[in-house]
Amino acid sequence: MSEHTKTTSHGGAGRALLWVALLLTLTLLGFVTATAVRNNPIYSDREANGISKYRFIENCKELTHDTEELTVGAAGQSIPLKTLIEQSAPLKAGDTIHADLDAEPAEIIKATQTIEGGGWTLTAPATVAVHSGERTNTLGQLPLQCAHDRKTGKTTAQLSLPGQ
């Protein structure tokens, strides 16, 4: 047999090392994924609370943007935000009211708590402003109270006057 037709295989050890490296990589990836899921700050028990923590926070943000429906709790009454603002100064044509959560994401996550019996609650500051074209007139901050009732499956949001 000539040297050119002689078969020698040196790939057996290399293939074994490749498989070991692949298995170690998959094991490490599984461990990192499991650790990250357990330590996720917005991980929640959707069954126990009726909605995930992430979805609850997003619903609260959406409710603050719906200023036509957003109310302010004052002396046991619910007054529409728009009505309360127009009592001090009527809105001009084209003016819009904006209410935005004014807290860092980490603060919002930390402020989101479970309710006994299932559900969520969140109290965080919200900045209320009137937008007139390019100009913004910030009216101030009010505490926003957002809650999700597991039984009804409904998320509600309401601003509060200071000291209420």
Image (cartoon, helix red, strand yellow):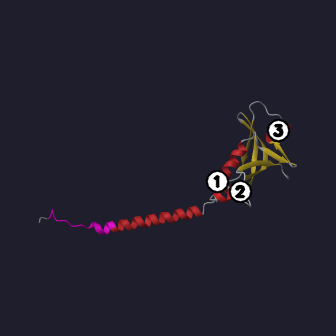
Element marked by disc 1: helix
Q: Which residue is mark 1?
A: 54
Front-lying residue, 32 or 103: 32
Q: Residue lying at the far left in this picture: please name it.
A: 1
**From what the image shows, is residue 127 above or below residue 115?**
above
Q: Of the residues shown, which amino acid type is indicated by label 3?
A: Thr
Q: Measuring 72% from the left and 51% from the top, which residue is drawn there? A: 152
What amino acid does circle 2 point to?
Answer: Gly
Cα–Cα span, label 2 and label 1: 13 Å
Quadrant in which residue 3 is drawn = bottom left
Mark 2 against mark 1, which lies toward the viewer?
2
Residue 134 - label: none
Q: Decide: marks 1, 3 in contact (CB < 8 A)? A: no
Q: What residue would you read off at disc 3?
A: 83
The prevailing secondary structure element of the residues shown in magenta is loop
The kind of residue on which mark 1 rests is Tyr
Residue at numbered disc 2: 119
Between the residue at mark 3 and the residue at mark 2, the CA separation in whole angstroms equals 30 Å
Give the mark, 1 or 3, whose residue is nearer the N terminus.
1
**Could you tell which of marks 2 and 1 lies nearer the N-terminus?**
1
